[in-house]
Amino acid sequence: MKAAMKAGERERLATLRMLVADIDNERIRRGSAVDEEAFVPLVRRGIKQRHEAAEQYRKGGREESAAKEEREAEILGAYLPQQAGEAEVRAAVERFVAEQGLSGPADMGKVMGPMMQHFGSRADGATVNRVAREVLGRAGG
C-alpha cells in the first residue's frame, strides 16, 4: 500500500485497502491470523466479484465502470501464487485418470479431491473441474 500511495496510484491503493479490510474481517471471523490457505480464497473471491460486476456494468452499457472492475481484478491477481497453466492441469488430470482407471462423470469426485490437493492454491476449482469433465468425458466415451 505504501508503494501505491507514494506512486499516487489511487485505484491500486483503493483496491488494496479493500483487500486489507477483507483480510481483517476474515481474521476477526476466524479468531486467528489469515494464512495463505485463507488468503488465496479471499483474493479469488475479490477477483470473481469484480468480474461479475464488470459483466453487470457491460449489460447496463457502462463500459468505463466495467473496465475499472477488470483493472481491479488484475491488481488482485498479482497477489495470487503463480497459477498452474491449463496444460499442466490437463496433464495431471489425464495422468491421474489413467493411473486410477477412472472414466465417466460418475468419477468426478474421485478426481477433484486429489487434484485440488495436488495443486493447492496454484489452480482454481473451476479450471480443474472443467478439465476433469472433459478428460472423464473422453475416458468414458
Image (cartoon, rainbow, N blue to C red):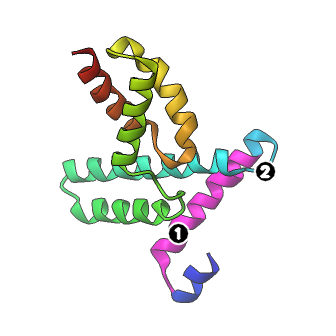
Dot 1, how many residues are within 10 Å of its Cα: few (below 14), some (14-19), or many (20+)? some
Q: Which residue is mark 2?
A: 33
Q: Which mark is residue 14?
A: 1
Number of numbered labels in the structure image: 2
**Closer to the camera, 27 or 77?**
77
Identify the residue shown where x is 40% and y is 42%. 89
Q: Is residue 31 above or below residue 133?
A: below
Between the C-alphas of marks 1 and 2, the distance is: 22 Å
Q: Amino acid at mark 1?
A: Ala
Q: Earlier in the sequence, mark 1 or mark 2?
A: 1
Q: Is residue 111 above or below residue 66?
A: above
Q: Nearer the viewer, mark 1 or mark 2?
A: 2
State the SS at label 1: helix
Q: Residue at x 43, y 38 (%)?
A: 92
Q: Is residue 19 above or below residue 34?
A: below
- Kindly identify the residue that appears in the image at 49 percent across and 51 percent down: 46
In the rendering, at what x and y percent does residue 135 appear? 30, 28
Q: Quadrant of the N terminus?
A: bottom right
Residue 52 lies, in percent from the top left, at: 35, 46
The residue lying at 27 percent from left, 48 percent from top is 55
Report helix, strand or loop for mark 2. Answer: loop
Q: Measured from the top left, where is residue 94 in percent x and y?
A: 36, 32
Q: Which mark is residue 25?
A: none
Q: Is residue 108 left or right of residue 20?
A: left
Q: Please name the amino acid that badge 2 sits on.
A: Ala
Task: Determine the main secondary structure of the stretch shown in magenta.
Answer: helix
Determine crowd level at label 2: few under 14, some 14-19, many 20+ residues with C-alpha closer than 10 A: some
* Quadrant in the picture for the C terminus: top left
Q: Residue furthest front?
A: 99
Does 91 appear in magenta? no
Q: Which residues are magenta?
A: 8-27
Q: Position of residue 49 (x, y in %)?
A: 43, 47
